Image: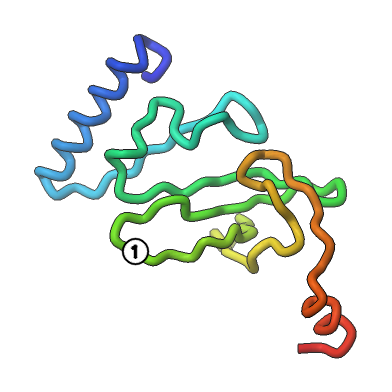
Amino acid sequence: MERVGPVRFFREFVIGLTSYAKQEEVCSLFTSTTPKLSGGDSITEAHTSTITDAILLLRYVEINGIFRRGVAVIKMRGSQHEKGIREFTIDSTGLHIGKPFSNVQNIILGIPSAMPPSEQEQLEGMFGE
């Protein structure tokens, strides 16, 4: 629908649709894809983030030549949500949210790169938790 007309018309349509859903007390879920595998230049290409209550970002993350999936809560109105980016997997039993990615930066930008482990993480690795 976003590609049919100007971005302004799409934005107005989404505002009207979400207003109607809220008026009718209907929980709605909208998805948006990006043309690039590593993500787009904006969280919401049509700039609809101001009218949403929550934004989850799903990203592919390549670490050491292996594709993994990450999920982050970018926005959750009225909540002190977790700011970490966690790995998630999907299998025959459902969706599983794993541990936060550690020692990786720039995942949101679509260009993850390794960070050296902190001194505390090195010590934990040597002596256990």
Residue 69 visible from this viewpoint:
yes
20 horizontally vs 48: left or right: left
Residue annotated with mark 1? 79
Q: Helix, strand or loop at disc 1?
A: loop
Quarter of the image for the N terminus: give it: top left
* Coordinates of residue 25 in the picture (x, y in percent): 14, 49
**Residue appearing at x 69%, y 61% in the figure:** 101
Percent position (x, y) of residue 65? 86, 46
Image quadrant holding the C terminus, namely bottom right
Locate residue 93, reporting x and y percent. Answer: 57, 63
Amino acid carrying label 1: it is: Ser
Q: Would you say 28 lies left or right of 129 here? A: left
Q: Nearer the viewer, residue 110 or 18?
A: 110
Residue 91 shows in this picture: no
Identify the residue at the far top of this view: 5
Q: Residue at x 22, y 37 (%)?
A: 18
Q: Residue furthest front?
A: 119
Residue name at image x 85 percent, y 77 percent = 122
Compared to residue 65, the image places residue 125 above or below, namely below
Mark 1 surroundings: few (<14), some (14-19) or many (≥20) residues within 10 A: few
